[in-house]
């Protein structure tokens, strides 16, 4: 071979590709390796798309090479203007493929469509056979450089192209083609090109598979819906305009899931794009048009209401596809939307008009879904409103300043005077005080529903800020500790029971998380020699008196009897106080007790009081 100026540019191209393979195929790992194969396969698929080939055989050989054979027209071998055979130019020159006219729907450079010369440059060796004009032509290359001329090696009456290549170990970190990856892609190709026979031979494991789907994307749709309850036969629509070819197959199922699979020029677009937008617009418009024409008082349906349970496959063939994203996951050609929308609109409308029984059932389904979605939306708005309303904190709350929930404490304090003392006594940095009025509500007469309407209870809910019942979200609670601080008398005990029952019924996770406490104020103050000692139980008092001898004993009946300093020292100071953590069983008991005290059932209330007279008294202490 004699080298001319043109050969030098070929060598430049090869060098560029081998120097920066990532620029052309993304990576030199498994992904890049498979890109080589996709590139070669795409060329044959393009020939099939052009309508000249109906069979592609992919072979994974034991020596690490792969071959792709088709029965298309065969790559032209005649002399090209560069003074070399066209075949050689295609195989050695970057982006030369498109110039040869079979790539109407070729994918613009990048992921696929880099040209078979890139595959050649990155292969230890590559061999090509072309069957056309009654002859078999052959050429071999090593690392992209021709090692033979295009020579005739036999005769045939068939046409086609076969490329066999061995990825270069000097380039690739991964050299093994993955059977599953390859078979999955070939199956997809077969689905997307109805009638095309795609054969996979894996000589390494002695397996041969053939994919051929007469139904094309309808077959893909059916396989996607396998195991689902479908509501009708697949709807298939096709059409074209301005060189854009559109195919859509879809079907409604009884599931709630919408799943739309989109392809442009046989490439999967996982993020959809203009073809998907066009499909959705056309479908929505057609369904509403049909509804308006055939139903009295028809309410316009939204796209989402229509698409619940929809499975769809959309495949477009676009002359100059534009994609977004490294993996071509989204089609961006704006002209595609218009074409798909109009094809889908007229196709769907036609189907609905022709299949009135199915159409009526579908429209009724859409209306049902619309109602359900509206109801769900209203419920959501209600919760949101409630939450918004709860953002304004109750006026009586003396909040703390720390923003760290883990150190914030809320004291729910009974009585205005005790509330006042507590506000003076507290450490305002991390202790908040919510005073609640003496008898919040007539415990004996009011049920829980009424109690929830009670102003004091509402203040507690908003102060905690985590909602109630099934909408309660522990993570939203504004305090890490909720501390109930009530007087040690009958009223105090009533209120404590009510509060425990309330938390048990409406904020149970708070208790389960161990975040509800009962403050333990001292029962006695013992004065001796100008000093004051505290006793939290009768036993403690007894011990204290034994130690101190003669002393003045004061029994605290209410929190209000202590001055702020005393309240801080005895009940609120985290260093000295005693807090009783509420256990779920305690709260449950309180709830049972509350229900009986509430007394809807007079008989059981009587029995309970008789049976538990003692306990009730002790609770009331
Ligand atoms: C350019 C022109 C023609 C066919 C092809 C390329 C062609 C390329 C590949 C790649 C793999 N298989 C292929 N099959 C065909 C058409 C030439 C004519 O007019 O006959």
Image: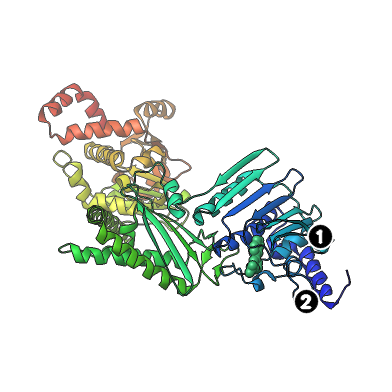
* Circles 1 and 2: CB atoms closer than 8 Å: no
Tag 2 secondary structure = loop
| Residue at mark 1 to residue at mark 2: CA–CA distance | 21 Å
Tag 1 secondary structure = loop
- Please give the name of the residue rendered at 12% of the width and 35% of the height, measured from the top-left corner: 600
Q: Residue furthest right?
A: 2
The total number of labels drawn is 2
Q: Nearer the viewer, residue 552 or 490?
A: 490
Q: Nearer the viewer, residue 513 or 606?
A: 513
Q: Nearer the viewer, residue 439 or 193?
A: 193
Residue 33: % across, % down: 70, 54
Q: Quadrant of residue 83?
A: bottom right
Q: Is residue 363 above or below residue 6?
A: above
Q: Earlier along the polypeptide chain: callout 1 or callout 2?
A: 2
Residue marked by disc 2? 82
Where is the N terminus found, in terms of image quarters? bottom right
Residue marked by disc 1? 143
Q: Quadrant of residue 90?
A: bottom right
Q: Nearer the viewer, residue 89 or 475?
A: 89
């Amino acid at each position: 071979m004699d080298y001319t100026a043109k050969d030098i540019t070929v060598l430049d191209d090869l060098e560029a590709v081998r120097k920066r393979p990532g620029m052309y195929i993304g990576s030199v790992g498994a992904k890049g390796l498979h890109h080589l194969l996709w590139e070669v396969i795409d060329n044959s698929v393009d020939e099939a798309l052009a309508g000249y080939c109906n069979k592609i055989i992919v072979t994974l050989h034991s020596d690490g090479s792969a071959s792709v054979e088709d029965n298309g027209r065969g790559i032209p071998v005649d002399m090209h203007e560069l003074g070399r055979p066209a075949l050689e130019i295609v195989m050695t020159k970057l982006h030369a493929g498109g110039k040869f006219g079979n790539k109407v729907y070729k994918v613009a450079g990048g992921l696929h469509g880099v040209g078979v010369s890139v595959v050649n440059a990155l292969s230890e060796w590559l061999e090509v056979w072309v069957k056309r004009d009654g002859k078999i032509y052959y050429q071999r290359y090593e690392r992209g450089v021709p090692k033979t001329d295009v020579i005739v090696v036999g005769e045939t009456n068939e046409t086609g192209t076969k490329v066999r290549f061995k990825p270069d170990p000097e380039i690739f970190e991964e050299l093994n083609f993955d059977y599953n990856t390859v078979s999955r892609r070939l199956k997809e190709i077969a689905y997307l090109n109805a009638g095309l026979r795609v054969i996979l031979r894996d000589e390494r494991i002695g397996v041969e598979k053939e994919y051929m789907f007469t139904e094309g994307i309808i077959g893909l749709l059916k396989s996607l819906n396998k195991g689902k309850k479908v509501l009708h036969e697949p709807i298939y629509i096709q059409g074209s305009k301005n060189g854009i070819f559109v195919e859509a197959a879809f079907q409604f199922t009884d599931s709630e899931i919408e799943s739309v699979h989109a392809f442009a020029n046989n490439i999967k677009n996982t993020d959809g794009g203009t073809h998907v937008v066009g499909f959705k617009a056309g479908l929505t418009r057609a369904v509403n048009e049909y509804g308006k024409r055939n139903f009295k008082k028809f309410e316009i349906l939204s796209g989402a209401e229509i698409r619940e349970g929809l499975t769809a496959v959309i495949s477009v063939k676009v002359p100059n596809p534009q994609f977004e994203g490294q993996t071509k996951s989204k089609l961006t050609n704006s002209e595609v939307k218009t074409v798909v929308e109009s094809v889908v609109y007229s196709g769907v409308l036609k189907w609905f008009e022709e299949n009135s029984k199915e159409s009526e059932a579908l429209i009724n389904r859409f209306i049902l879904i619309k109602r359900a979605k509206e109801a769900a939306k209203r419920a959501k708005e209600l919760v949101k409103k409630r939450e918004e309303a709860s953002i304004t904190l109750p006026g009586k709350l003396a909040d703390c300043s720390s923003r760290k929930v883990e150190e914030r404490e809320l004291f729910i304090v009974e009585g205005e005077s005790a509330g006042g003392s507590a506000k003076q006594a507290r450490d305002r940095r991390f202790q908040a005080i919510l005073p609640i009025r003496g008898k919040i509500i007539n415990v004996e007469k009011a049920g829980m529903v009424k109690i929830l309407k009670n102003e004091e209870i509402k203040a507690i809910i908003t102060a905690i800020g985590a909602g109630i019942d099934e909408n309660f979200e522990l993570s939203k609670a504004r305090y890490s500790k909720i501390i109930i601080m009530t007087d040690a008398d009958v009223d105090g005990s009533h209120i404590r029971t009510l509060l425990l029952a309330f938390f048990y019924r409406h904020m149970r996770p708070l208790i389960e998380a161990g975040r509800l406490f009962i403050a333990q104020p001292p029962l006695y103050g013992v004065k001796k020699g100008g000093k004051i000692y505290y006793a939290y139980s009768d036993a403690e008092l007894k011990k204290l008196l034994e130690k101190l001898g003669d002393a003045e004993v004061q029994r605290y009946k209410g929190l209000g009897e202590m001055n702020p300093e005393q309240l801080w020292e005895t009940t609120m100071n985290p260093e000295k106080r005693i807090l009783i953590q509420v256990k779920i069983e305690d709260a449950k008991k309180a709830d049972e007790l509350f229900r009986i005290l509430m007394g809807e059932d007079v008989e059981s209330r009587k029995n309970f009081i008789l049976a538990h007279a003692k306990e009730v008294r002790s609770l009331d202490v």
